[in-house]
Image (cartoon, rainbow, N blue to C red):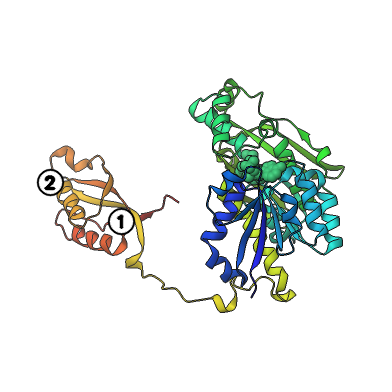
Amino acid sequence: MKPVNIGLLGLGTVGQGVANILIRNADEIKRRTGRDIIVTRAAVRNQGKAEALELGIDVTTDSQSLVTDPNIDIICEAMGGDEPALTLLNLAIDNKKHVITANKALIAVHGNDLIDKAREQGVSVAFESSVAGGIPIIKALREGLAANRIEWLAGIINGTGNFILSEMAEKGRSFEDVLAEAQALGYAEADPTFDVEGIDAAHKLTIMASVAFGMPLSFNGVYTEGISKISREDVEFAAELGYCIKHLGVARRRDEGIELRVHPTLIPEKRLLANVNGVMNAIVVHGDAVGPTLYYGAGAGSEPTGSSLVADIIDVVRGMDADPMHRVPTLGFQPDAIAPLPILKAADYRAAFYIRLQALDQPGVMATVSGIFGELGISIEAILQKEPDAAALVGSDKATVPIILLTGLVQEGLIDQAIAKVQALDTIIEPVTRIRVETL
Ligand code: NDP
Ligand code: HSE
């Protein structure tokens, strides 16, 4: 089947993430969609800089030529800002191209008109990547939770702001210092006051509320406070009281209307949201049927955001030529692309292990046990010998002592061999306990 051609507006942090994912995962994506998807052209301001990336994409500074190019099927906008992005997306829709954007400012403020125009022209407007980076929250709200009346949602939805608050709380770093690092990492908006004054979070809340409650995008209705006035002292005092300060976006349905607000918030430190740190985002969505659900992941960055944008591309491609009942293949991959993979036996799994032994309290036991692990090439990451039992107090040679080992990553077959050898020692007097350790 003919490849799907993508025109990319912008080849910065997000644009490069999209291009890299489409190149690296081309085969896997084709197994899902049945079509090759190729970024054929990209528009930027600085052509030399983009060409130096050597992505095999035809780069131009003439953005208009991209959105009117008859060979391009889908326009992805990762340029940012109001103009020329808005004009270009309108032109793309006029030219009957599907449009996908990471630009939450644009969708929150101009989305109603864009969506109307796209419906008239029979094309899609998709914006998963505009909210919470790599978290598929729009899909969750629109599809996974479609049975529910959404009561409220609340989340950490600005990666830069959360990175700043976390580094201030954990490492005592200054606001300015952490913001500069977030900019260098590509997390921050072109104008970082959008991040620190809550405007970016307000854009994202606008979009989520619209999808959650079935209302027009209403950016002007969002009450907005940022984090710029939060001092290190506030963070420390809140911690003394058992709270974390997080910047939250909250959308709540009440009998009287909808609350839409973004602001710094004290959250009890045991709550899941209080433990979302760095550039990570998380959103709690409360549906009347399902209750609270939590969505967590990287809230900014090149490939996390690219992941969401490419998912939108895949959605659009699946809709282009599939019959309506089989738009998304039942198992996610095209039926003829499903291939058996070898399923490993337990002995071939790899894991780290917690191992507890009850040993006679005699000299040399620890060395013998360590020797068994060493001979099999199993590294011991930590070892702990607890107090011997009461028999030791009266000098009995039957006194026993618990020994706890943490191993490094190891093939399970080897750990089975090590445990069998340890268990066979006269000095080990109870069955060895083993529990797998996953750092996740
Ligand atoms: P970058 O600044 O890294 O990249 C912007 C790209 O767009 C660059 O290639 C730039 O070209 C190009 N560009 C900008 N203005 C023009 C113009 N007038 N004409 C032609 N090309 C232009 O931005 P990001 O990738 O970080 O952000 C892009 C969008 O994605 C924004 O809307 C942002 O809000 C959103 N977003 C960003 C995330 C992130 O983690 N960074 C996460 C989620 C969404 P050149 O370099 O030549 O100037
Ligand atoms: N500047 C945004 C953030 C990018 O830090 O969350 C992701 O939308």
195 above or below 373?
above
Left or right relative to 421: residue 111: right
Q: Residue at x 69, y 75 (%)?
A: 326
- Observer-nearest of 166 and 56: 56
Upstream in sequence: badge 1 or badge 2 = 2
Query: Which residue is labeled 1 in the image?
Result: 433
Q: How many residues crowd around disc 2 within 10 Å: few (fewer than 14), some, or many (20 or more)?
A: few
- Name the residue beneath numbered marker 2: 364
- Callout 1: helix, strand or loop? strand
Residue 402 is left or right of residue 50, and the answer is left
Residue type (three-letter) at the residue carrying disc 2 = Gly
Q: CA distance from mark 1 to mark 2?
A: 21 Å
Mark 2 lies on a secondary structure that is loop
**Residue 93 appears left or right of 185:** right
Q: List x then y, in percent, for residue 227.
A: 66, 29
Q: Quadrant of residue 141?
A: bottom right
Cβ of disc 2 within 8 Å of ligand 1? no
Rendered-image quarter of ligand 2: top right
Residue 399, image quadrant: top left
Q: Residue at x 82, y 52 (%)?
A: 114
Q: Residue at x 21, y 54 (%)?
A: 373
The image position of residue 183, as x and y in percent, is 58, 34
In this view of the protein, which residue sits in the foreground, 204 or 109?
109
Side of 350 where 74 appears, left or right: right
Q: Check disc 1 and give the amino acid type.
A: Thr
Under 8 Å from ligand 2: the CB of mark 1?
no
How far across and down, in percent of the image, does residue 220 sit? 83, 38
Give the total number of marks visible in the rendering.
Answer: 2
